[in-house]
Amino acid sequence: MESLERYSRQIRFSPIGESGQMELASKSVLIVGVGALGTVLANHLVRAGIGLVRIVDRDYVEMSNLQRQMLFDEQDVKDSLPKAVAAEKKLKAINSSVKIEATVTDVTKETLPALLEGVDLVLDGTDNFRTRFLLNDMCYKMGIPFAYGGAVSARGMSALFIPEKTPCLRCFINQGEGTGQTCDTIGVISPVVDIVASYQVIEVLKYLVNDHEALRGTLRSFDVWKNHQFDLKMDTPKVGCPTCQTKQYPALTIEEDHVTTLCGRETVQIQRKEKINLQTWADRLAGVSDIQLTPFLLRVQLSEGERLVLFPDGRVLVQGTEDLVRAKTLYSKYIGE
């Protein structure tokens, strides 16, 4: 049987076997973020034969991504493809028996419930803790396991959080306590990304084939350059944790900002209430700026030096500044609202 031959080496691994392979084929997962971590996560899970892999990302492929985001190439950059679209194309070519669902959107408390529909587990491929805490709170509210991962510089962290079984992300990291360091500010080496994502996938495979006794049960942190590694046991929740103990789920109750600085990227995101017709805006802006229109986005190079990127779902990125006032000024000048 062709499908068994594809997975023959994985099936020969006794903790998975043929029964485990059938389990994997019946499962559905959501990968949030299809950048450095997300492309590795998706690559491993699609090759492993997960039944449905749903991917979501709001961004598009840029040249600086190619150093570590393994599913993209130079043509994707030239075409200004959204990451979810480019990844979907590559993943379908890797394994046509796996169902791939790609969505280009921002992950918010409004969009997340539909993305979570029918999934058995969520994997973190994001680059910011705001989205991670949103995933953490929504997953614990809905009873869905959450595979956390983060990578920057030569450092990485990973853990599998399971509602009613383990403490949650908030038990170990308080919102707002991040270092502020990002791949854009202090860099990242590609191997650490692969290691973090592989740790995530290993725990996910254990969980999905029901080998729960083999789960690591720790929050693992490491520095591959300095050869450090530390495991923090996940056996005691934080007293009064608002997510896994008192079930207040803070990320689901706070008001979402409509204007957000994307840390370390010199980009401000503005979310419009209305959808954007890319052709209409291309026609409006063609006379005042250099534009690049694709089926997925409209890129507008402004004479001031900054750049606007418009998406059909109503998002506008103001690139070249982290100054909210400056971003709003440019937005009002060219888009208005």
Image (spheres, helix red, strand yellow):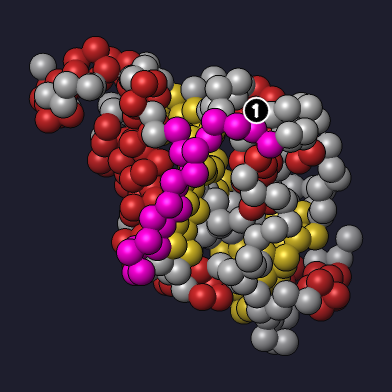
Q: Quadrant of the N terminus?
A: top left
Q: From which residue to which does the magenta span run?
A: 217-238
Q: Pick the residue in front: 243 or 191.
A: 243
Q: Is residue 300 left or right of residue 91?
A: right
Q: In terms of depth relative to the viewer, which is nearer, 288 or 46?
A: 46
Query: Based on the displayed image, in which of its 4 quarters is residue 267 positioned?
Result: bottom right
> Residue 318: percent from the left, percent from the top?
70, 70
Residue that carries the numbered disc 1 in the rendered image: 140
Q: Nearer the viewer, residue 136 or 298?
A: 136
Under circle 1, the secondary element is helix
The crowding category of the residue bearing disc 1, from other C-alpha atoms within 10 Å (few below 14, some 14 to 19, many at least 20), is: many
Whole-percent x and y of residue 81?
Answer: 47, 58
Q: Position of residue 309 (x, y in %)?
A: 64, 65
Q: What number of labels is visible?
A: 1
For the point 64% across and 49% down, which residue is it? 173
Amino acid identity at mark 1: Tyr
Residue 59 in the image: above or below residue 188: above
Q: Is residue 74 above or below residue 52?
A: below
Can the viewer see residue 69? Answer: no
Residue at x 38%, y 29% (from the top left corner):
215
Q: Is residue 65 magenta?
A: no
